Image (cartoon, grey):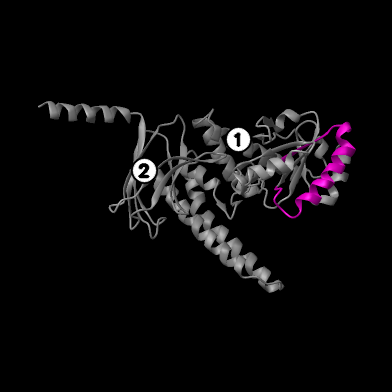
Amino acid sequence: MKKYLYLLIVIVTFSACHRNDFTVTGNVSDAEGKTLYFEATQIDKIVTLDSIKLKSDGKFTFYAPKTEFPEFYRLRLDSSYIHFAIDSTETVAFHTSGKSFTDYSVEGSEENKQIQEVSKAGSLLKNEVDKILSNTGTSDSIRIANAKRLLNALDQYKKTTLPIIYGNPKSKAAYFAIFQQVNGNIIFDPFDKEDSKAIRAVANAYDVYYKGSHRAKQLYNMAIASLQAERQLKQPTLLEQAKEASLIDISLPDIKGKQQKLSDLKGKVVLLDFTAYQTDYSPEYNILLAKIYKQFKDKGLEIYQVSLDNDENFWKVSASNLPWICVRDEASIYSTVANLYNVKNLPSAFLIDRTGAIQKRIASIESISGEIQKLL
């Protein structure tokens, strides 16, 4: 009798421990001995929450505390991922194979079935993009053919995702679709007129249903930036009369670990620069920036340089003697802030005026000095 009473206490205690958690469970066949990781996909980084070494039956169960607002997670096996989202104490089950990890079934969540649809559409787009990139050539016919294939592939992706976005813009799947990437590039461009409509739809829904969440704030900033870009396109010769742009703010640590906010530089002309020190161009590029900084710093110029280097130590050594603000995004090529600014090449620079309005993207290194002079 005591034995059964003890077991009952253990069961009740175990259940109480997970009363406010959500559960991720399932099995991965053909993966014995491999490690399955449970990770949180935060806005600015990936955080490993738990892991399990799979046995012959492939069964797994993970728990995590429920959150106030929807959050995103992934299961990782080797270099393959299953993405999903949670906003309650629900239980979601995934069944898949180690041989084809991304070909899975999901139970317990209709929204995660939609996320699966978006993931499949993203995989098809990536496969087509990789084929296009392998079809190299300099002739006009090849370039035109590649451009048509790319436009068609993007169109197919959006035929799958736009009904999900506009059908329920407050859904986790809608948010997930907006932030999908291919080879480090976001698919929905906040500075593209049509794409910005979808972004604004999700931003408005999140502002209503999840007001106060960091993801609602992220979407709001994107929507404001896209609106400002649209106004500039409508009035390209009247930038000085345009309304003040709402800056997509950045807060990242410098080499001493101090958080440096881009918005704190309001009142100065700011050169926002995305770069990587572990590149061939970096030494010569920073020498040029040093000359410009010396020329204009007393007139009100500041440089806010965001490093996307993987190697933190290399960055710290390289940035230690630079006189301007140097910060680093540890997400590197997966940087959210770089994606929000639609950075597709390094270096990429933007000029911000004294009011905090983004005035323009710098087209070339040689034009930086002249563009700064205009604002000063």
Q: Quadrant of residue 17?
A: top left
Q: What label does residue 109 carry, if any?
A: 2
Residue type at mark 2: give it.
Answer: Ser
Residue 353 visible in the current orientation? no
In the picture, measured across the screen, residue 103 lies left or right of residue 361, that is left
**Residue assigned mark 1:** 220
Q: Quadrant of residue 234?
A: top right
Find residue 69 and report its horizontal and vertical position in percent.
47, 32
Q: How far separated are the C-alphas under marks 2 and 1?
A: 27 Å
| Residue 282 located within the stretch drawn in magenta | yes
Find residue 179 and report its horizontal and vertical position in percent.
55, 46
Residue 124 visible in the current orientation? yes
Find residue 59 and report its horizontal and vertical position in percent.
30, 48
Quadrant of the snapshot with the C terminus: top right
Q: Secondary structure at mark 1?
A: helix
Residue type at mark 1: give it.
Answer: Tyr
Find residue 339 and report its horizontal and vertical position in percent.
63, 46
In the picture, measured across the screen, residue 7 lies left or right of residue 53, that is left
Mark 2 or 1, nearer chain start: 2
For the record, the magenta segment spans: 276-305
- Pointer 2: residues within 10 angstroms few (<14), some, or many (20+)? some
- For residue 247, above or below residue 55: above
Residue at left offset 71%, top offset 39%: 228
In the picture, measured across the screen, residue 253 lies left or right of residue 128, that is right
Q: Secondary structure at mark 2?
A: loop
- For residue 75, above or below residue 326: below
Prevailing secondary structure of the magenta residues:
helix
Disc 2 vs disc 1: Cβ atoms closer than 8 Å? no
